[in-house]
Image (spheres, helix red, strand yellow):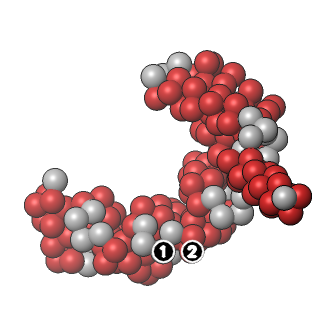
Amino acid sequence: MKKSIAILLTLLLCFCLLAGCGGGNNEAESFFDQGMEARDAGELDKALAAFDKAIELDPAYAEAYFYRGRVHGKLENYMDELAGYDKAIELDPKLADAYFWRGSFYDDVKEYELALADFGKAAELLPDDAACRVMRALVYKNMELYDEAVADYSQAIALDPAYASAYKGRANVYLLLGEDELAEADYAKAAQLE
């Protein structure tokens, strides 16, 4: 009888741990969800407050830091935006969206080497994502590394043959390389897809 009770209590304890009986994470998730809803509704101050509360309840909540960073970006609080991405990556080095958006941030401020590193990491974490390659190609174009840009645009097209922006981007680089016929073909394909 004692053995049965001990087994039952052990199973109950395991269930509670797996289900999150403490409630802290569930409450943090609730505030995170409120933050997402407010962000989607354009209520950025409300979103920020909800993400702050989620982080207060769960300081290891990487996605809350990430989305708080995104909201700061929309509010033009750029250093807080970057801090959100940095903390999210620190807490979850596999959070590809944080690398992607930090790469976009670095591209905007013309920190191209940092942008390349982040888009490269995002592409590594999301091997089937064409957008990572398009953004990295854009950075290569900005750095006047046209062959690398063409290679990334081509990879994006291979991953998503209906990605019109990838064809347009590659066409723009082909023009810079003096490859007018290739550029025309890509522009035509982009127009067909739109």
Q: CA distance from mark 1 to mark 2?
A: 5 Å
Mark 1 is surrounded, within 10 Å at the Cα level, by few (under 14), some (14 to 19) or many (20 or more) other residues, namely few
Residue beneath the point at 30% across and 69% down: 160
Query: Quadrant location of residue 155?
Result: bottom left
Residue 139 is at least partly visible in this image: yes
21 is higher (above) or lower (below) than 103: above
Q: Quadrant of the N terminus?
A: bottom right
Query: Quadrant location of residue 190?
Result: bottom left
Please name whichever residue, 107 or 183, is drawn nearer the observer in this view of the structure. Answer: 107
Identify residue for label 2: 124
The reply to whether callout 1 and callout 2 are in contact (CB within 8 Å) is: yes
Identify residue for label 1: 127
Please name whichever residue, 66 or 20, is drawn nearer the observer in this view of the structure. Answer: 20
137 is higher (above) or lower (below) than 64: below
The amino acid type found where label 2 is placed reads: Glu
Q: Secondary structure at mark 2?
A: helix
Query: Residue 3 appears at what percent x and percent y?
Result: 86, 63
